[in-house]
Image (cartoon, helix red, strand yellow):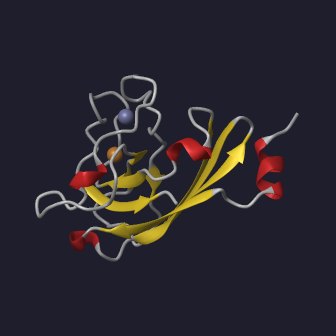
Amino acid sequence: MFTVNRALLLQRPCYKAIISGSPKYDKIHGTVSFYKACNGSLIIAEIFNLPSDNGIFAMHIHNGTDCCGNENDPFADAGSHLDLLNNQHPFHTGDLPALFSNNGYAWMAVYTNRFQPMQVKGYPVIIHSAPDDFHTQPSGNSGEKIACGIIK
Ligand SMILES: [Cu+2]
Ligand SMILES: [Zn+2]
């Protein structure tokens, strides 16, 4: 069997999102890497300087075009959850496990067969200020968008 571990050893990431915080959270930075694995994707996130007021942060791939926005929502153009198959939250293509912060540092890996890396190229990864409840429509009540990066 071609396992995720083996896929990781053999490959470099296909795509990577360089994450930056919004003006209010400008110290946040990190990477989210996408590897092709087992007919799906292996995703590895490493994020620094998450805010200390909340230990768990929702993360999704959104369906927008860039990490721009306005004063109220600095990442408004990131849009809503990427949903290639017309599903409800938390079964959207772009729904991912949350980041668990350790004094501001988070490292997370997950395998999913909801998409291949090439299907999410060009879309934004968004980190939110609150955990995803994996229930509330349309986006899990996960708070404001605090960091963003385009998958390139
Ligand atoms: Cu989101
Ligand atoms: Zn969703």
Q: Residue furthest bottom?
A: 27
Residue 21 appears in the picture as rendered: yes
Pick whichever, 42 or 134, lies toward us. Answer: 42
Q: Which part of the image, by quadrant, shows the N terminus?
A: top right
> Picture quarter containing residue 150?
bottom left
Depicted 19 relative to depicted 37: above or below: below
Residue sitting at x 25%, y 58%: 75
Residue sitting at x 43%, y 50%: 123
Residue 51: image location, x then y, percent: 32, 67
Residue sitting at x 34%, y 35%: 133
- Left of 149 or right of it: where is 112? right
Residue 39: image location, x then y, percent: 71, 34
Residue sitting at x 21%, y 71%: 24
Residue 48 appears in the picture as rendered: no
- Left of 106 or right of it: where is 6? right
Depicted 131 relative to depicted 70: above or below: above
Residue 131: image location, x then y, percent: 34, 46
> Picture quarter containing residue 46?
bottom right
